[in-house]
Image (cartoon, rainbow, N blue to C red):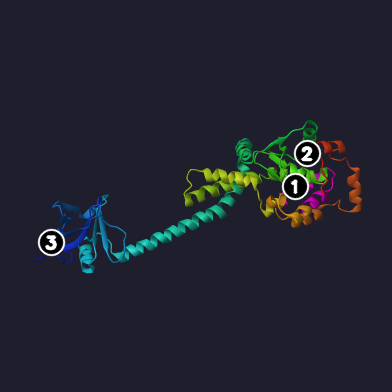
Amino acid sequence: MPSPSARDGQSSAPEVLRAAYFDGERADRQEVMLRLPPEGIGFSTAEGESVFWPRGDVHRVAGPDDRLILACGEARARLQLHDREARQALLRHLGALRGARESARDNRRVVFWLIAATISILVCAFLLIPLVAGRVAPLVPAGAEIRLGNAVDRALRDHLDLVTCEAGPGTEALASLTRQLSELHELHVDPQVTIVARNEVNALALPGGRIYVFDGLLRVVDGPDALAGVIAHEIGHVAHRDGLRNLIQAGGTGFLLGLLFGDFVGGGVMGTLVQTSLMASYSRRQELAADRFAAQSLHALGRPIHPFAGFLLDLDDEGGGFLATHPMGEERESAIRQRDPQANHAGESRAEASRALLTQAEWADLREICGTGARDPGA
């Protein structure tokens, strides 16, 4: 007499198969005999409990190649079959379940799409987002950029424990120098230059116009013209919205990498934003554009730019500091000197005849703004 499976038009299979049953509650292994009615799988436990698994609820569980592991629905109970012929017979009976070869193909497909998704995220993070950031940054309203800059500024102050220096005469001298440089250009925000009491030879610009000059740089820069070049360079980054562009890029990249590595909360993104502001390593194009901005500013004021170029060259010999966050020191120094029409004797004479950006007294007050006093750069 044909088996039930044969009556259903499927291949003939034995009506009873031997399997190991684990109830999901205990580690005990129970030997059971499976009955194969057309509707699914039936068996009795060692305690005599009758169990039936409907065909539509039975699914395979990943395991070694030498056994077939089945489960039913969301329950933790498992059936295991080791005998090869029994495994094949049960798979033929269930029909809807896929064989090991198909599962292997599915696994390969999953791995393929996982790799493809990872590559897509990385391409977006490192190629597409920088392109989008460059297009989006100029469209951000100045007010929104200022609010973003304030938020980053608060995080940066907490991260670095920044202390600003505001000695009266020195602050006035800094404001005068900043005003002379800012009035040359139509800027979307007003630059706010502040000296902070840190020993690093560095300067950085935040979105919204905040510019920090570290006291360590102020104490080694050789005169007002060199300092004016540094500040004008940072104003150039503000004018070109380089800080905003880099923050948009860092935020988008951090979010995508968070999706990839599991940081959905966003703490890693804020950390990235702070680190981006602290170590604002600009691209070659951004640096050269800011250098051109600084050169144009100094030329418009009738001042030479070779003091600024010499400052870059001196730091390039020492390494670190301003050149760590504003790379290409020697290359930039050479490009700046080539742009300086006053780098000859006649030009130097004309620069000496032009009005100095700060008087000697103002320069002395500015260098003492943090209470550290003037120090010879060569000391």
Boundaries of the magenta span: 288-312
Q: Nearer the viewer, mark 1 or mark 3?
A: 3
* Residues marked 1 and 3 touching at CB (< 8 Å): no
**Image location of residue 333, percent across then percent down:** 78, 54
Q: Quadrant of the N terminus?
A: bottom left
Asked whether the viewer can see residue 35, the reply is no
Q: Nearer the viewer, mark 1 or mark 2?
A: 2
- Count of numbered circles on the image: 3
Q: Which numbered circle lies on residue 293?
A: 1
Q: Secondary structure at mark 1?
A: helix
Which numbered tag is attached to residue 4? 3
Name the residue located 54 percent from the left edge and 47 percent from the top edge.
252
Q: Amino acid at mark 3?
A: Pro
Between 354 and 200, the residue placed more toward the observer is 200
Outermost residue, left side: 1
Label located before the other in sequence (1 or 3): 3
Amino acid type, callout 2: Thr
Any magenta on residue 245?
no
**Residue at screen point 75% across, 40% down:** 185
Mark earlier in primary sequence (1, 2) = 1
- Return the disc, 3 or 2, that comes first in the chain's sequence: 3
Q: Tag 3's secondary structure?
A: helix
Decide: is 175 above or below 104: above
Q: Amino acid at mark 1?
A: Phe
- Labelled disc at residue 372: 2
Q: Position of residue 291 (x, y in %)?
A: 74, 50
Residue 323 on image: x %, y %: 72, 52
Residue 192: x, y in percent? 71, 36
- Which residue corresponds to the image point at 72% horizontal and 54% vertical from the top-left? 319
> CA–CA distance between discs 3 and 2?
96 Å
Distance of label 1 from label 2 (alpha carbons): 31 Å
